[in-house]
Structures are given as C-alpha cells and as structure tokens.
Amino acid sequence: MQASSLTYNEKMLANYVPVYVMLPLGVVTINNVLEDKAGIEKQLKELRAAGVDGVMVDVWWGIIESQGPKQYDWSAYRSLFQIVQECGLKLQAIMSFHQCGGNVGDVVNIPLPQWVLDTGESDPDVFYTNRSGNRNNEYLSLGVDNKPLFYGRTAVEIYGDYMKSFRESMSDFFEDGLIIDIEVGLGPAGELRYPSYPQNQGWVFPGIGEFQCYDKYLKAEFKEAATSVGHPEWELPDNAGTYNDTPTSTEFFGPTGTYLTEKGKFFLTWYSNKLLSHGDQILDEANKAFLGCKVKLAAKVSGIHWWYKADDHAAELTAGYYNLKDRDGYRPVARMLSRHYAILNFTCLEMRDSEQSSDAKSGPQELVQQVLSAGWRENLEVAGENALSRYDRDAYNQILLNARPNGANKKGPPKLRMYGVTYLRLSDDLLQKNNFNIFKTFVKRMHANQDYCPDPEKYNHHIGQLERSKPKMPIEYLLEATEPMEPFPWDKETDMSVGGALSDLIDKILSIFK
C-alpha cells in the first residue's frame, strides 16, 4: 500500500509500541502450583480491557526441573498459558535459569533445583565466587558452561535440554501464536552479567560491586589466557575493593588505576569477553531449540547506571560491561545478539538523572541512550522495561520518550522506535483506581493514541519462523564494535505525555471530593 493512500490512523499505527506487563514472580508457586486461577484471570482481563498487548512471565528452572535431572513438570505453566490465551493476550516467556530471591524487588524465594545445589555442596566452585571466597548460588558460574559436572551434563547442555522440553510441551501454544518471545536467562536476575552487586552479600547502592571470577574454573582459564600472551605472572585483581567501596578508594579504579594499565586492560577484556561467549553459546542452544517456531529470541542487559558518569565506570566493569569513554561496552553485546536475530532488552527506562543522588555519579538517561543506540546501530530490535515499580506520570513520560526518542511521525514509521516495552509489574498497587487510570493513558500513548491492535503486522512487527543463527562471529569482529560512536539524539521530552503536575493536581482534587 502506498504511504499516500493510507489513512491518518494507519500512518499513526506505524508508531505503535506494544505494551506487556510482567506477571508476579510467584504466580506459579515454588511447589509448581497455579494457586489463584480466578484471581489471575480477573487481573488479566483488566489488563486486556486496558489495551495491554500481552504479559511476560518467568518460567523458573528451580520449579520445573526440581524433582531431578530431566524430570520436567510443565503442568502449572500450561494452565497459566491457557488462561493468558483465553484472555486474548500475547505471551513473552523467560527461561529463568537463575534463583529468585536476594535481588532488588524479589519478594519470593525460588532457589536453583536441589540436585544442582547438591553438586555445589561437593564442588562449590560451580558458583560465582568473589575474591574473599564468598559463593553466590543464584546462577551457575560461566566457568562450568562446558564442564560435565551435573550428572554427566554441562550447564549449557542443561539449559539446552530445558528449552527443548519447553518447546515440545508448549508446541500447541507456539502454533497458535500465543508465545511471541522467548527471553533467554543468561545470568543473575535473568541478565547477561556477573552477580557483582548481590544484596544477600551485603551490597548496598551505590557500591561499586566486586569481580566474580575467583572460582577455580575461571581462575584456571585466566591463568591460561595470561600465559598465552607471555604473562604467566599476571593474577586476577586483588586491589579492586569490596562491594560497597567507591571507585576512588580502590587502587584498581583510582584516577591512575590498574584498569588503565596493560595488565588491567587485559583482565577487563578477558572478563567481558567471557560474558560475550557465554551469552553467544546459550543463545545458540536457544536458537536450535526453537528453530522454525514463529517466535523471537531476546536477551536482557542490565541497566547499571551508578558511576556511569565517573571516568572508571566501576559498577559496569565489575558486572562485565567493559564500558568507558573511549570504549563502547554494549555494542559488542548487540553485535553478538545480531548473530541470533535476538531482541536486546534493556532496563531502567523510567529513570531520570535528576532523581538520582549526585554522589553516585548516576547517568540512567545517557546509559539508556547509549545502549539503545548500540542496538539500533547493529540493526537489532530493541525492547525494554522499567527497573523499579513506578505509578507516577514522570516515570511513564520518561518511558514514552525512550520508546520513541524523536517522537511520533504523522506520516508513517518514526525514525526510532522501540520494539516493545514490558511494565514491571502486575500488582494490586497497579490496579488501584488512580494508578490504573494513569497506566491506561500510558498504554494509549504507547500505542500512539490508536486503539489496541491485535495484528502486529499492521504496525510492522513481523514474526516469521526463527531461522538458524548466522555463523559464529570471530571475537575480533565483535570487538571492532567497541569503537565509540555518538548516540542518536533524543528529544528533550516526549510528544505524547500522560500529563504532568497539573494532571496530578486535578487527580488530588478529584480524590478529595470523592
């Protein structure tokens, strides 16, 4: 159809950004039961009536394969998916290979399967480890990705088998087009990163966090890598401080710190490259598992915005994002994802610099700009979510700005547009009348003031059959993407605001008279 022959609404539909809502963490209980069917159905119907396009749900490894290796029980999730389908919503499923509990916003506790934890009892090095030897059992160390330590299987094989079983058990939901998105968990909180800032080990914001590569497997790999470049004497950092330090109080991140030396650069390159190849390998398994399904793969990158405006970017570095003024730490991740046609999903979309304390040198707005630009430069679809539950107009307006950084285009597709936004999370607070009214306006604005559209093709979201990943990219090619580039320009504010201070005042007055 010619652009000129399209109606105004059809042109505006090209600006539509679908909205998904994250379901509660424990919607399926640790005992693998969908407890409150009637309650969840009622809430899903409210979301559908509000114009929401779909929901996202964690599919917990610790629940599904809890009874023993390869003993999968998908029944509770099948019941849940059935309800989602009956309510006319689409589904984004997260392959959650991490524990729930011990992170920001975790209100339920779902550990890894007991048989995995048992392996960790006899071999604690299967878990990420910091310099003082503290183990973190929220996700298996990438050092054991290819070690057959789990009843004869490697970690990567476990993840691959789980995803194949999910595909087989849910094949009818794939065929019906219910499941549109498989987000592959690649680390703690489902994010491609190291668990560098664990609350359950005493980290508090804005601590710089700690490197997590001191298990025997990663230690040996580092020693081998250092020896291969003629430096067998190089060791892992011992001067990078502890979880709650500031960068300048450490030798590693100080103004003339180790991170600027040849040895420091070698370590940071090795540490961040390990993360890239970890993500690449598991996404390759996901691609094989879901090959031919009408679905997209996605991976989540963490929004580590504190110390972003410091020269050393310490909190990003300890998490595995080797990002500095003169080195882009995110575009190599985007380039790796492009091999698998995967969506880059990013967090902290709602945050503004002005809301952060200046001590933390926080730059969420610039960080979002950098990461989304990196994704777009590598021709990826880019999606995102808010990091913390917010119900205020400022937060929604910031998400709207990031969803269409240069506003809507009244003549057709906008220059830049996010592929989708997932709101965190479904709760009684969200559905409280005043909060939900603002949320409904937000959904409408995300849809470019158009009605809910059940056909993604109409807003240029084509979900074809997943094709085989492209050939493995040499690490040199991935690292070419570290060359810094200016991010795309963002408007100052969204052109489709949900209102501001005046709207808040009117809400207040109305609530008094009710």
Image (tube, rainbow, N blue to C red):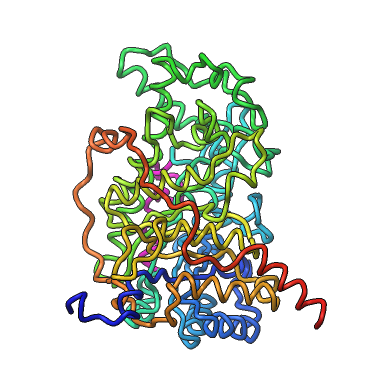
- The spot of residue 57 in percent (x, y) is 52, 68
Q: Is residue 275 left or right of residue 360?
A: left
Q: Quadrant of the C terminus?
A: bottom right
- Report x, y in % for residue 374: 35, 45
Q: Is 497 placed above or below 483 here?
A: below
Camera-side residue of 165 and 172: 172
Q: Is residue 167 visible?
A: yes
Above or below 86: residue 334: above
Residue 302 image position (x, y, % from top left): 50, 47
Residue sitting nearer the eye, 280 or 156: 280
**Residue range (magenta):** 144-165
Name the side, left or right, on which 287 lies relative to 446.
left
Q: Quadrant of residue 434?
A: bottom right
Residue 152 part of the magenta-drawn span = yes
Task: Estimate the x, y position of residue 405 in percent, counting from the top left.
Answer: 41, 56
Residue 73 in sight in this render: no
* Residue 486 appears left or right of 20: left
In this rendering, position of residue 276 left or right of residue 471: right
Q: Residue at x 54, y 29 (%)?
A: 310
Residue 452 vs residue 235, the one in the foreground: 452
Query: Which residue is located at x 51 percent, y 14 percent?
Result: 256
The quarter of the picture where the N terminus appears is: bottom left
